[in-house]
Amino acid sequence: MKSIGAIISWFRDKNMWFIFAFIGAFITGIGQVLVKRGQVKLTPLLDNFIAMIIVNLILVPFLWIWGVDINVGIDIILYALIAATMYAIFYYIISVGDISLMISLINAFPVVTIFLAISFLHEWPNLYQWIGIILVVFGTILISREKEEKKIVKNRKRWMLWGLFGAFTIGTAEFVTKLATNKVDGFTFTFFVYIMYIPILIIFMVYDKAGRKLHLLKSKASLIYTVIGIFFIELGLIAIALAYQYGLASLVSPIVASHLLITAILAVIFLKEKLLNIQKLGIVFTLIGLIIIGMMT
């Protein structure tokens, strides 16, 4: 029993980043299932509005009580502003068309994060980690595959461009999270990201007049699922930031992307959705990749 306890203690100490990354992916996966369950079509502006209200009424006070360092440099504020902007823009990206044609490319965002981490932070995973990374990224892309409607195939190039832009926004947000958590803890950085939602929303409120459809927030019984889902997604950012604090960006990002694995499994269990064979294959690849990364770190 003592040896087992020692092994568990060793894994916990050496793999805190993996634990936090998986927790972040799990929480995010739950949030996405709840949003999917709500099935409320809101404007990107309203999505950002709900996110801003939730984080500043609940999560910001929580982090303040937990303890954050408010004496940070201008670089941390800038990183937080960039991350908040990328997350806010993402809502607009997924609203431009059929998400089923973009989601596979969007969920390849670890490629962006890994490229930036290798280029600027000089990270280089070992051979086994590379195998795990490739399996997870490839697996999440397969999981996100859906049946395509023939009527929208003609717009494939347009959706591909938006999908690539979506991958760029999330990948960049993840990378600046790593840059910031090299200097401050994950709680502090996420605190400032949440605060930065306020000026970003104000700017969008000024320019996105068409998105001010507040009536969409009324008389929607299923809106509660959307609100709770967004809460979980935003809560997941805390665990994700802690993962980047303790681990390499090139390893954390593919684990974070595995939230699709959680979403797919929960959707089958609770929403009674059916998976395509290619999605089942993606789940297998993702699980194997997660195990390899976790074991070979």
Image (cartoon, grey):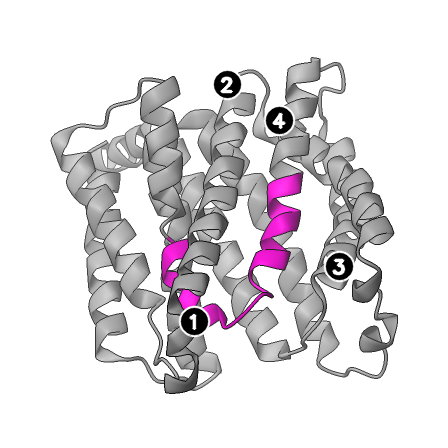
The amino acid type of the residue labelled 4 equals Tyr
The amino acid type of the residue labelled 3 equals Leu
Q: Closer to the N terminus: mark 2 or mark 4?
A: 4
Q: Residues within 10 Å of mark 1 (few under 14, many from 20)?
A: few
Q: Please state which of the two labelled residues, at mark 1 or mark 4, is closer to the viewer.
A: 1
Out of 119 and 294, give the one closest to the viewer. 119
Residue 245 visible in rendering: yes
Q: Please state which of the two labelled residues, at mark 2 or mark 1, is closer to the viewer.
A: 1
Out of 133 and 199, give the one closest to the viewer. 199
Please tell me whether residue 6 belongs to the stretch shown in magenta: no
Q: Please state which of the two labelled residues, at mark 3 or mark 4, is closer to the viewer.
A: 3
**Residue 155: mark:** 1
169 left or right of 292 in image: right
**Residue 182: mark:** 2
2 left or right of 58 in image: left
Please tell me whether residue 90 belongs to the stretch shown in magenta: yes
Q: Is residue 283 above or below residue 53?
A: below
Question: For the stretch drawn in magenta, what is the main secondary structure?
Answer: helix
How many angstroms separate mark 3 from mark 4 (CA)?
Answer: 22 Å
How many angstroms separate mark 1 from mark 4 (CA)?
Answer: 34 Å
Q: Quadrant of the C terminus?
A: top left
Q: Closer to the N terminus: mark 3 or mark 1?
A: 3
* Span highlighted in magenta in the image: 85-107
- Residue identified by numbered label 4: 79
**Residue 45: mark:** 3
